[in-house]
Amino acid sequence: MTGESIMSQTFVIAGGYLNINKAQDWTSTDVVRKLKGVTRSKKIGHGGTLDPIATGVLPICIGSATRFAETVLLGTKSYRINMLLGSSTDTYDSTGEITAEAKFFDVTRNQIIEALEGFKGEILQTPPMYSALHHKGKRLYELARAGIEVERPPRSMRVLSLELVQFEGSELVLDVECSHGFYARTLAHDIGEKLGTHAHMTGLIRMHAGPFKIEDTVSIEDVIELADSGDWRDLLMPIDTTLQHLGRINLNTSLVEMVRHGRPLSISNIGDNGAHRPGERIRAYTPSGELLAILIFEPERLGWRPEKVLAGL
């Protein structure tokens, strides 16, 4: 058996993503803790926090995928938001204490549609006090629970689409596609103010996050069942799921060994005559099609340096 065929059979990357449909009242940390016990994975984390009130897409990074957790946050996200007109809360959702109520309000469907136009495109959004953002070493929600409110600078957000799905009585259902860091609770609160009344969010479903879609999710119970009856790894999405925006190259066995030992590859090594930008990144694969590393182009070296190299089994 040749060295290349041995390599293709034995080099296997351990890890990937579980696209979990988070249940209501679970925190994102609860999900990670539970799955760590079920899968017995030493390295596990989530990509993008969901509030306990929310359900839907929660990508879980396992094994070598934890090294690419930041790529889970790339791309857009979409949500289905349920909200109630007429009252606001300190958390901007139904888990909080009511801070204001309107004795009377009269809002029409056309007024709502007109108001939504002001929340499309590039907008500024002020994070809620009940959030995990830091202020002088403290989480904002810790300050909020202590009765302290601090100034929060507004942040630029991008709303690609915002549609009214349903309006009945004082209840609204909205669909939104937005950039990372968007607060659906803040949107509900701000829409209430725009309409001259109050509002808060009563439910939230994350429909997609980058390449992770709700129709492809699995439940924690699905993972538990397969862990008991077979191999839960059959539910994993590949590590390169979040890396499709990068180009790719396939390496032969000798180049795989160079990359595994952290040695850079020259342009002549891989027969690449293309034009590349300084700092450009590319996916490198083994002969068997396993993701091996992310390489970064450094023109001063006339080649590619291994930036992240995955361990093989």
Image (cartoon, grey):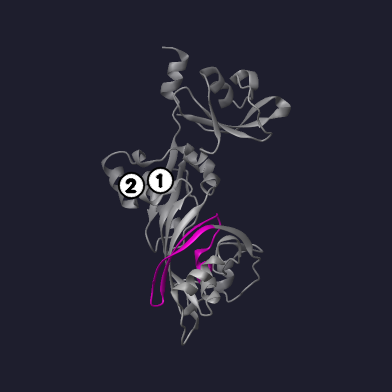
In the image, farthest residue toward the top = 1
Given contact means CB atoms under 8 Å apart, are the residues at marks 2 and 1 in contact?
yes
User: Mark 2 = which residue?
Assistant: 223
**Front residue of this view, candidates 284 and 108:** 108
The range drawn in magenta is 160-188
Image spot of residue 140 (x, y percent):
59, 67
Work out which quarter of the rendered image holds the N terminus and state it. top left
Residue type for callout 1:
Leu
Q: Is residue 175 magenta?
A: yes
> Up-down: is 59 above or below 154?
above
Q: Nearer the viewer, mark 2 or mark 1?
A: 1
Q: Residue at x 46, y 20 (%)?
A: 7
Q: Which mark is residue 18?
A: 1
45 drawn magenta:
no
Q: Secondary structure at mark 2?
A: helix
Which residue corresponds to the image point at 54% horizontal and 60% vertical from the top-left? 182
Q: Nearer the viewer, residue 188 or 29?
A: 188
| 3D distance between C-alphas at marks 2 and 1 | 9 Å
Please, which residue is most extreme toward the left here? 229
Q: Quadrant of residue 265?
A: top right
Judged from the image, the secondary structure of the residue bearing numbered disc 1 is strand
Q: Position of residue 156 (x, y in %)?
A: 63, 59
Mark 2, residues whose alpha carbon is within 10 Å: few (<14), some, or many (≥20)?
Answer: many
